[in-house]
Amino acid sequence: GENVEQHPSTLSVQEGDSAVIKCTYSDSASNYFPWYKQELGKRPQLIIDIRSNVGEKKDQRIAVTLNKTAKHFSLHITETQPEDSAVYFCAASYDSWGKLQFGAGTQVVVTP
Amino acid sequence: NAGVTQTPKFQVLKTGQSMTLQCAQDMNHNSMYWYRQDPGMGLRLIYYSASEGTTDKGEVPNGYNVSRLNKREFSLRLESAAPSQTSVYFCANSPLTSGGAHEQYFGPGTRLTVT
């Protein structure tokens, strides 16, 4: 099965700085890599995703990069704001039925 | 258009009691999922359903059963609750297409405590 490792487990950044979260996966057949943001007491919500035929994707202050050869992908948040404080989860698909294997999560704290 | 709804929001059970967590979606998606979320462990798949009448085990199915009677509803049953099942439970759904995996849409969660 798929194994997804996520680092770091906690990340503290000053407002305006960048934040980077990295994930590695084990199954070379994985082809879909979403990132979810979960605020305290709320449900996880998709913020960006990437498929294996693309190396990078950007959406305003958020970007994801994928290195299929090394089997790792990263989330980049630029110009961080206090509302970016949350837990972020990476995930990787591991079968044709859409199942996802999630990383353990990164607690991001943005301090003013 | 509620998306994904879950009931109850909170529940406290004693060891050995049973209960069913309900999930319903109005997004007309085929695939539905049950996850549990524990601190430091991310989201772990309990059971999965590709369509009405079909279910499949996920990573942590022991102690749970599921039922997918129609396209909208996917229920999770704990027959004999144990303290190790104290967790937050999320239902999710996604479209299933030949293109592979897609975004999963999560419900608001059920916080379950077993004493």
Image (cartoon, grey):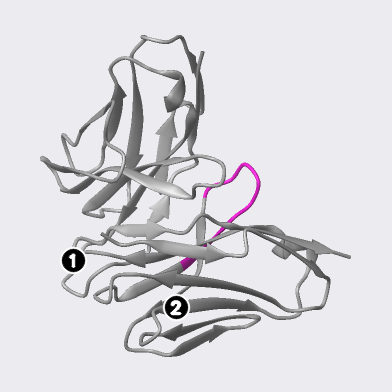
The image quadrant of residue A17 is bottom right
Q: Is residue A77 left or right of residue B44?
A: right
Residue displayed at 54% across by 85% down = A58
Q: Is residue A67 magenta?
A: no
Describe the element under mark 1 as helix, strand or loop.
loop
- Residue B1 visible in the current orientation: no
Q: Which mark is residue A72?
A: 2
Describe the element under mark 2 as helix, strand or loop.
strand
Report how far apart the C-alphas of labels 2 and 1 lie in the structure.
Answer: 20 Å
Image quadrant holding the N terminus of chain A, namely bottom left
Residue B83 image point, x, y percent: 46, 20
Residue displayed at 51% across by 54% down = A104
Residue displayed at 48% across by 38% down = B109
Density class for disc 1 (Cα within 10 Å; few <14, some 14-19, many ≥20) is some
The image quadrant of residue A9 is bottom right
Q: Is residue A45 left or right of residue B20?
A: right
User: Dot 1 corresponds to which residue?
Assistant: A96
Residue A54 image point, x, y percent: 38, 89
Nearer-the-camera pick, B61 or A59: B61
Chain part drawn in magenta: A35-43
